[in-house]
Image (spheres, rainbow, N blue to C red):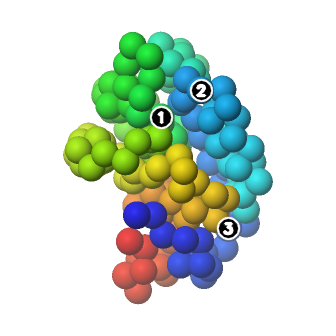
Amino acid sequence: MAPKSPEFSSVDLAKLPEIRTLVLDDSSFDRKRICRMGNGLDLKLRIEEATSVQGLKECLDRQNFDLFLIDYKMPGSDGLSALDVIRNHKSQSGAVSIMISGQADQRIAVSAMKNGCQDFIMKSDISPDYLQGTVLSALSGSRQFSRYFGDLQARGESG
């Protein structure tokens, strides 16, 4: 379960750099909802969208990302396949991934975490505060962003 934003209240969000984010979801409604919430956070997210694993591959070839928000269930593929594509792409090694699912399945969550996801959240649980806390928690473990969370990590509050 992802932490709420108040656990990161000592982090100066204004000092965080822009977070290059890719939202991968075949559902236009869910993708737009997540993007709308992401754009309303106290974080500087630069959000790109993809509707399929093929679209993900095209985005990966165009630019690097810091954060992936990945839907689990997609036609012809799934979020685990997307994780595999990300993990095997030469320029995405430092990125963090969060799996998002409409179904509460512990096996999927465990598999996602074993395959490199920093968190697994239910679509029904997503709110702006919840999403921000989840993103901050994932980024706090990232090499690229860890310096912004140094005080938290020293106190053992990041996860």
Say what amino acid the circle numbered 1 marks: Asp
Numbered disc in front, either 3 or 1: 1
Say what amino acid the circle numbered 2 marks: Ser
| Residue displayed at 53% across by 78% down | 7
150 vs 89, left or right, is: right
Q: Within the image, what quadrant is residue 36 found in? A: top right
Nearer the N terminus, badge 2 or badge 3?
3
Q: Which residue is mark 1?
A: 71
Q: Which residue is mark 2?
A: 27
In the image, is residue 152 above or below residue 76? below
Numbered disc in front, either 2 or 3: 2
Q: Which residue is mark 3?
A: 13
Nearer the N terminus, badge 1 or badge 2?
2
Say what amino acid the circle numbered 3 marks: Leu
Q: Residues within 10 Å of mark 3 (few under 14, many from 20)?
A: some
User: Which quadrant: the C terminus?
Assistant: bottom left
Secondary structure category for the residue under label 2: loop
